[in-house]
Image (spheres, rainbow, N blue to C red):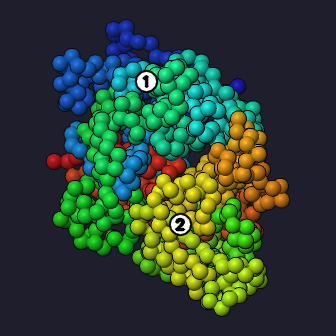
Amino acid sequence: MYRTRTKRLSRTAGTIWVLLLTLALVLSACGGGPEPAAEEPAAAEEEAAQDSDEGAGDAMMSTKEAPQLAEMVAAGDLPPLEERLPIDPLVIDLPWIEVGKYGGTLKRTTTRSNLRDTSAYMYGHSPLHWEEGGTAVGPGLAKAWEINDDASEWTFYFREGTKWSDGHPFTVDDILFWWEDMAANPDHPMAIPAWTLVGGQPMTAEKIDDYTIRFKFVAPAPLVDIELAAFVNGGVSGNFGPYPRHYLEQFHPEYSDAADYEEFTEKQDWWNNPDRPVLNAWMPVLLETGNRMILERNPYYYAVDTAGNQLPYIDRLEVTYSENAEVLKLRIFNGDVNFHAHPHLSLRDLAVLKENETKGDYRVLLWDNGAGGAPAWGVNWNNPDDGKRAVVRTVQYRRALSHAMDRERIRKITFLGLGEAASTGTMSPNSGQFNRTERGQEMLVAWRDSAVTYDPELAASLLDEIDVTDQDGDGFRDLPDGSPLEVRIDFPAGNTAFIETAELMVEDWKAIGLNAFVNSIPGSQLGVMTTSATYDIRLYGGGAPDGPDLLTYPAWLVSYGSGGRWAPLYGAWMAAEGTPKEGTELDLDPRDRTPPREEIPVDDPMYRMWELYKQAIAEPDEDKRDELTFQIIQIHIDEGPFLLGGIADPPNIIVAGNMIQNVPTRDDLPLGGWHGPGVLGMPGAMTYPEVYFVAE
């Protein structure tokens, strides 16, 4: 027996679509219009009304499109709108928005030379969407979905008539291409997403028809809907397809003798290849890496506003590379940028940003980060230095680092006194596990406060306990064998928002005799160092904000994956379980494997975390699943911290040009915005930039 997952009703769309449905039914009775689908499951009541009669959407939307697209239709260069939209388009309705106007350009800038963070503005490839600020899941590219009683089978129904930006039909074959020829293909470098592995085995994907697909798991997989809303799928995460099979097959070795995987990976992603069709609101038309990217409206985008206008409102996105944060800010001050959300600006810039609001014709907004502790520092459990690794694995050393941190000073200097509480380092306090029960709140507080007190004397005594003392009289503590102990804090170049925080940490740790120093590294190089675990401490500027479910992105909770936040070699070993990589390359040094990975000893706390995590993600009962999650957190409390944090839930700066409308304030957004997590895909997944518009 199947049951249908439903989303919460939006505030106004249901009424509008019921009225439209009534009108369509009257017209149908008079003129023999199309029959409503009788047995197809609906995602919610307003979606059922919307889905029930194809004529309602067609009648409403036939002339509601951007003027330049209407001109192309009139000239015969583009099919009419009713042929470009699916039968049941996605209706975007948010409490703070009004029906907008077509036209204009959204101008942003970034210090990331590859310009990839533009993907955070695109949510079109996601089958399901976050709603209510990340506390609910609703339809997206998929209009409805079903699960069986034990959550081992999930069936998704996609919008019939959806098309890629080049006009080619989208079908579930594009999802099968992602799964069979990319993610589950051992020859392709894409890793199998964690959510597809349950019970130590990958899922199977079955095509039911062109718009219906079923995922089957060997054990319950209760979090699939959350996973398929997570990130901006089709973005940088690889968490889910679809990928345009009709275009990419020509570059895939399975289908073309002249192709190889190196070329394929260069062509597969739209932020590297503007020729690749997309399902997003805008499609890339120009890419100059290290300079700029231009995107224009997708004439086949499958979403509309509540009045039936095809989205997006804005014609173009222009993204310009800024060499550093100072150049970025100057562009904002001069009015060359009319929207900025990434990369994060320092709150220390708030005063000067406010001073230049009139000159730059913009307004400054503050959205909550949602982090359990920002910044966050991962202390490398897999340190390549034997002496350092032995010290890191003592609870005294990591607690000494934490108790030496003057977090109140961090709050005052870095966050201008804003943010919530000082934090040892947790995941987001907004996460469901912390808010469903009183026990959840107790676990959050226990984790947050486990080593949070500022006590340099205690920190020094903890280091003395493990013989990390100054043995050569140079003023710095040494390893127990007498060799020097250096503590290097690595962070990505260009992330100026937290340079000052890192320098404050250096002062605090030097005060207890540790030879700590800051090391700014280009992001690509730091990524390689993270994967190979060749660092001491890595700073994560956004903190640990991920949620809404603690199990959704386990890099923070159990250090899962090659990007595991404090034990990346063990995390990569976890990720290889159940894949063709499992049990291979055992004759190689862990750092020489592809990807670098190392087996977890059974007596290691990471092993216990991993076993509990696997049980949790396969537990269909929410209360039992939460309890397993709390057991993982208890390991953090008893044997941690493994991840150090600063201040919980500080705000992030957003800059919006005064002419850019439908941009929400903090008060508009549930939970204040929750702008930090990649898993929530801000701003694309929460504020829908396709409904932003340029006012006159």
Residue farthest along the left direction in this orientation: 696
Hey, which quadrant is residue 469 in on the image?
A: bottom right
The structure residue drawn at horizontal position 32% and vertical position 32%, both measured from the top left corner, is 298
Q: Position of residue 546 (x, y in %)?
A: 56, 55
Q: Depth check: 588 or 370 in front?
A: 588
Q: Callout 2: 10 Å neighbours few (<14), some, many (20+)?
A: many
- Judged from the image, the secondary structure of the residue bearing numbered disc 1 is helix
To which residue does mark 2 refer? Answer: 490
Residue 192 visible to an observer of this rendering: yes
The structure residue drawn at horizontal position 60% and vertical position 27%, both measured from the top left corner, is 180
Where 398 falls versus 144 (above or below)? below
The structure residue drawn at horizontal position 59% and vertical position 29%, both measured from the top left corner, is 179
Whether residue 229 sits left or right of residue 11 in the image: it is: right
Q: Callout 1: 10 Å neighbours few (<14), some, many (20+)?
A: some
To which residue does mark 1 refer? Answer: 247
Q: Position of residue 681 (x, y in %)?
A: 47, 48
Residue farthest along the bottom direction in this orientation: 473
